[in-house]
Image (cartoon, rainbow, N blue to C red):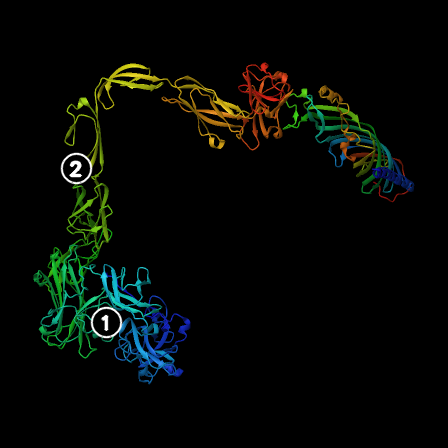
Amino acid sequence: MIKKLVYIVLLCWAVLPLSAQVIYECDFEDAAERSQWVLNPTANDQQKKNLTNFWNLGAPGHFAPQGEWGLFIGTSENATESGYSASKTIENVAYRELPTLAEGNYTLTFNWLANCKYGQEGLYACLVPVDTKTLSGATALTMAWFKPSVLPLSVDTVMHGTSTWAVATCNFKLNVAGQYKLVFMFFSVKGAVVEPAPCVDNICLFMAGQCAAPTNVTHTIVDANVKLSWKGNADSYDIRTYSYETGKWQEINTTQTIYEVPNVDEGIGIFFLRSNCGDNHSEWVKYEKFIFHKGVRCIDYMDLNSKNCAYGSFSNPAASKGVVDFGYAEKESRHTLHYVINEIDPRTLDGSIGLKTKPDDALASVRLGNWEIGAQAEQITYNYKVAEDGNAILKLRYAVVMEDPAHDASAQPKFTLSILHNNRKLDGNCGEANFVAGGDLKPEDGWHISNAASTPVYWKEWTTVSVNLRDYIGETITIKLTTYDCSQSGHYGYAYFVLDCENGEMSDLNCGEDNPTTEFHAPDGFNYRWYKADEPSKTLSEEQNFTIQPLDTNLYEVDVISKTNGQCYYTLKACGKPRIPTPRVTYETASTACSNKATFFNSSCVYVQNMVTGVIGPSEEKVTSLLWDFGDGSKVINNLSDKVNHEYPANGGEYIVKVTAGISHDACQITKEIKLTFPDISNDTTQIIENLCRKDYPYGYSFNGKTYYNDVDSLFTLTSLVTGCDSMVYLNLTWHESGPFLVKDTICEGNAYDLFGKQITEEGVYEGSGKGVFGCDSLVELHLHVVPRLTVTYPTQVPVCSDYRTVTIPYEVQKGFLSYIELRFQDAMQLGLDSVYIFSNGDPIEVVLPDSLEPAIMPATITFSTPSCPIPDAPIIIELRYSASVFTQKPGFIALMNEQYADYKFVEYQWYRDGEKIEGATYSFVSTTDDDIDHVYRVEVKIEGKDELVSTCNITYTGTTALQRITIGKGPYTIYSATGHYMMTLDNLNEIKNLTQGMYIIKNEINAIKIVR
Amino acid sequence: MRLRLFVKYNLAWLLLSATVLAAPNYSRGVSHSLALSIGGGEANNLFYKSDISPKAGGAGNIMFAYELQKQRFIFGLGAQLQYQYTQDQSKSFIDEFDRVDKTGESVSYGYVYNHLSTKAHDLRITLPVYIGYADPSGFYALLGAKLSYSLMARGQTQADMYTQGVYAWSIEPLRSIGLNDLSSLGYYPEAQYTNKSSYTEKLWAAASLELGSFIPLSEDNKNKKVRMRVGVYADYAIRIGNMGTLVVVDYSKINTNPQTQSQADLQQNLVINHILNSDRIGSICHNLEVGIRLTWLLNVNMDRTPCHCVRN
């Protein structure tokens, strides 16, 4: 179904000269403005009671997507629906006083709607001096104010005869300046009512001619776009279009005289253009055209051009090529399109009955011919290639309007259809149809007579005639439609038609197991004869639809018979059995010419189920759609062909192909998946690595037509004979000899050398034979060297007194070769240390700690590096201890001093004596006796704010603070000044000489004690 | 102080005088009785704003009195022998002295006392005088004054004490702790020190109150010669004299020479005075005794004047 859109004329502002020349505009949306309107004025209340129709303001009168108010006629005051009564001949007035008008040229535009009867009944617009009474009730047409004031509109003074909104534009010259009122008057004539009643909206009055509007607006269709072009010399142009996608009007500005409106739907396209001249604008120019897109139908029947249209006379309808089209409303038009919804052919209108100029579900119809007499004839010819997708039934919907002069049949007005194949009529003349005026024109056949005109007009309701073209699938046929007036020049005849295509199959057959059907629908536009397949002579029905009982699995047939020729028919089968569309597809794949191809073989059909036995099996019925999703991102296609080819990328891969079979307009669909795998035949590099035993390949190795006896390590470019694609091949060929081989190897102590399964751990010379790594026989003389594993002894914990800041880590290489040593402190950066300290073998491991470093336990790792057979890193703890200066001792105790004396605030204590923990000694002091003299004490302390217990340096209990009882352990002794300067080194303290009185620091390996001499 | 003493002394004399003066007014229609009372209860000292706190003690007494009763009015005068056992304990405290230690280094030497207490036995002779009211229902109330003198006021004072030293460099005081013996430095572990002594001021003046009920005897006692009553009594005594003049610990005999000081010296020479003599008692030392008293009354003359009162 072609989507029909009606672009609605904008509000007054769409047709306004939006410049300072606008005198008055009104869209009735403003309440204050509405209050200025005077509706239904009468001389007195009695006269008002006599009115049968009333002007109202409300929604029924509004036009355009925006807004809710307009002026409309209703049958009462405060009416909520538009409508009018024709019980009296009477008029109704509504007016609005305008601003003072100067002399000059004006343009008045407004939207209006009014059907009404012909003649004087209709809507009038007048410009009346403000002091002139304009009352409802009396027959205004005879009133003195009417005639001089009624405005000449662009089409006619009276506005009527349209059931769709129109635009009225009136250009007039005002010779007398002054105050005027704009008057709308509806004049109804006693008689029949022809809806819709008058409505008015979007009024605009402006000075004309300040800025020339665009002219000669034309359009072309470019795909789904409409390219507008026009003439003008303005600075720029504003273009308003309506977008059904957004539901809004949109406006663009361009300096060009061409603009392409994107994505315009088919239907009546309305575009508004105006010119911009500096600060001034012109009035909006409305460009309204019927838009349709080619290529979206099986036949572009709306495409009327000089190639397919012709006109002539009764005797020669195609005497002249060309389109005669002055618009659908023009009498002179002989090839034209009718697209207005609910448009009634005026010639057929009789009372409220008349012929719609197009079917409701059609976008537009073609009118061939006109109501002009003179023995005219017109012809349109279409070439149609009958589609392979099953749309092989040409469906012609037509309506005929003609006068009946009661001539001989051959001279009567008529409408003919002729379908030709290769310039020949179809077999059996099945493509011929004549619709001739006269004869027995029965109402039951859709014929009507309109006596509205002086001569009765016969018209036939829209009728469908279908022609079977299934025998011409893939062939191009010619469709020729011709209308004739009567040959004697006194009576006219013309026709409307719409062309469609169908598949001609039975519709709404059951689909699937769960939707049993009880009614079959034959295609439109034919006569029918239903019968059982096994009883063809017994006609069961001649209706289009045929009803069966549930579970009726009989096979029925219907002869689909041409209405114009009973000999032209085809037969369809129908069965009540459940039908299941079943995709049946096999495939072949090939990788040739450097591409991966797949060929699918289709034998899809409809499976039917016997409702009694439940057995499901194939039938001869084909599926009506077969959708192919090739699984590579390409577009899904509908292809019912027996063979479908598709190409896949050369780099291969896995693809899931989905084939969906459908019937009954895809109400039922079943999908089958096919998994395809393709190799990568694209241009990439392959590696060939060969380790070959010489003994096994006495004649060398063949590759790409050559024989190699030596090692190869090269890149080759080859063309695949199979795939046809170029590819790069990297060949690495290594020959392995049998030996004997002399192998010299080294292992680390503790490891083993595998000599053909024998584990050798000792250094020496060994012989062995066996299969090598690549399976080649080998005789080996092994000279094995065993590297001793590096063994280093070192302390795992190194205490350092905070007085001296030098960490010295003793070490001794017991075995192996040590090349260098690395010492890494954990958290080195936070501690202000280097990330790594490196020492050569033989150098002492000494690190000077920064003065800012507080006593702490510093984990570190030490790496004894050896060039071969590395050993794991070893953990080591460097403990920077509190200086012994934090102690004091007296006979009887050793005590830690407070913050003022020791620079630290100790809060937790655990004493040790000679390395052993003293249970219960958890105070800041420990008592001692003479038995403790020369014993070494230290205490693990925690200072305030820290959680870590760090030890103090050792202190030896002397029992006295006197120098006489110094004992600090074995030497050698190094003496420093109180400021830490080196003084001397002695093996025996008794050798101290030449020291002045003062404080010195004597240090041996661990202990330190401050001495005052 | 003088005002208090004046009040203490004269209150007792006032009460005594009033009762004596009142006695002759009731010579007619008067019942004369000899009263024998025994009583006992709890006794403890009372202190005000002091570091000493009393503990529960005990008391017992026996009294002879001559009692007059006319109608509902009672007057008595007697002699009482009163015994009390009291305990008083002081808060822990330190007495510190600046001195030098054995090495000659300045130290703040401290004696730390814990659990310092005096347990005292006090035997007093008391002269009570009282007046009272006897209700026909049997209820009686006696209000009087007493003057007591402690015949024996001996007590044993003991304390747990250790010494410590705090130096300028000390994180915490240096002291002998557990296994640690710093006696060589003059720091002695905690030990008990005991002294026996008496308190000096022994005169007490008390106010006395007794409430109770006459006990009805058998019907055979038609002459009502013997009566009996039982009541609860409370004696609130004020000690009279100069109290709290001594330091609680007397170091005057202690050897303070760090080179020669020893714990034996301390044991021998450290004098801990009776708490009630010490300045730790504060400004007030009172005594409270409460108990139950049983009194037998032997009527020595019958009043032949018809009595319109309701007899017990």
What residue sits 81% from the left and 38% below the top?
B209
Read off the residue under disc 1. A344
Q: Chain of mark 2?
A: A
- The answer to whether residue A82 shows anywhere in this view is no
Q: Which mark is residue B102?
A: none
In the foreground, A878 or A287: A878
Read off the residue under disc 2. A720
Whichever of labels 2 and 1 marks the residue nearer the N terminus, that label is 1
Q: Secondary structure at mark 1?
A: loop
* Horizontal and vertical percent position of residue A689: 22, 29
Asked which quadrant contains residue A250, the reply is: bottom left
- The answer to whether residue A304 shows anywhere in this view is yes
- The span from disc 2 to disc 1 (Cα, nearest Å) is 73 Å
Q: Secondary structure at mark 2?
A: loop
> Amino acid type of disc 1?
Ile
Vertical side of A679 occupied by A383: above or below: below
Q: Quadrant of the C terminus of chain A?
A: top right
* Horizontal and vertical percent position of residue A612: 20, 49
In the foreground, A252 or A507: A252
- Extreme-front residue of the structure: A994
* Horizontal and vertical percent position of residue B308: 87, 45
In the displayed structure image, the side of residue B5 where residue A880 appears, left or right = left
Q: Chain of mark 1?
A: A
Asked which quadrant contains residue B6, the reply is: top right
* Horizontal and vertical percent position of residue A876: 46, 24
